[in-house]
Amino acid sequence: MSEAFEEMAPPMPPALKAITLTHVRYRRGDPLGLFLAWVSLVPVFISFGGFVSHFLFRREIQGLCFTLGLLISQFLNELVKSSVQQSRPETCALLEACDSHGWPSSHSQYTFFFAIYLTLLSLKGSSGVPQGTSRFFLAALPWPLAVLTMYSRVYLGYHTVAQVFAGATLGLVLGAGWYWVVHTILVEYFPAIEESAIGKWLYIKDTSHIPNVLKFEYDNARAARKKVATD
């Protein structure tokens, strides 16, 4: 009889797994937790709001190299996590995050890679931003977000302090190393990429040699408009 009831019972649903990059929980009624939960989504905003838009409207080789570096960094993060297999803190049960490993924190690694790479781009004059206050402002801009993201992962219970510091350290090392690779080795191939068939088809370009891209584009846009008006 019991076997008949077992056959009639609905099958157990398969185990579900969340995408950890976007799966963020916080304590109900905690305004700081709500704020930090949104901060935890900074890598998502940078990836989809920043780099996708940048490629669609700018087509810069520098931006493509930046994106490639972040992808390599995240791949290495998953590789390290699967090798070390360090568990998340005990709070992971409430967050439904125990099915993934915690060392090093991918969010911390992502934001600190982004921060150091953007800082080096700005200070070394490869960002196209003119010298002066604007360049230093751009160099300093990502660091508060990086630190807040690191803090949010501990506050919300997704990582231990050691795990977020490990992610931050790895992100700094990989970001600085990738900047060196791009601007010492890959930069030599930028002209060839511009002149390639796919480069011409997609209008891929490099403007890192132009000291002030904003002024350059502004002057050329005005000149083109004046030329059209006089023709």
Image (cartoon, grey):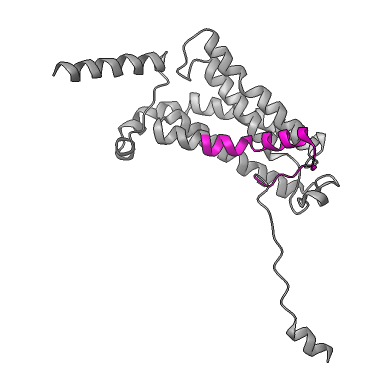
Q: Quadrant of residue 7?
A: bottom right
Asked whether the viewer can see residue 140, the reply is: yes
**The N terminus lies in quadrant:** bottom right
Q: Is residue 73 left or right of residue 10?
A: left
Confirm whether the magenta stretch covers residue 39.
yes
Q: Quadrant of residue 60?
A: top left
Residue beneath the point at 75% across and 81% down: 9
User: Furthest residue to the left?
Assistant: 231
Q: Nearer the viewer, residue 221 or 73?
A: 221
Q: Is residue 141 left or right of residue 225?
A: right
Q: Nearer the viewer, residue 95 or 147?
A: 95
Taking the magenta stretch, the answer to whether it contains residue 36 is yes
The answer to which of 151 and 161 lies nearer the viewer is 151
Most distant residue in the right direction: 90
Q: Position of residue 142 (x, y in %)?
A: 62, 24
Magenta stretch in the rendered image? 22-49
* Residue 211 falls left or right of residue 180: left
Name the image quarter holding the C terminus. Answer: top left
- Please tell me which residue lies in front, 175 or 159: 159
Q: Write down the quadrant of residue 2 in the picture.
A: bottom right
Residue farthest toward the bottom in the current orientation of the protein: 1
Q: What is the magenta segment's predominant secondary structure?
A: helix
Count of numbered badges drawn on the protein:
0
Residue 59 visible? The answer is no
Rendered residue at 55%/37% (across/down): 47
List the single residue furthest toward the top. 132
Give how far across and how far down residue 95 sits, in percent: 78, 49
Residue 23 is situated, as x and y percent measured from the top left of the image, at 68, 47
Where 69 sits versus 95, above or below? above
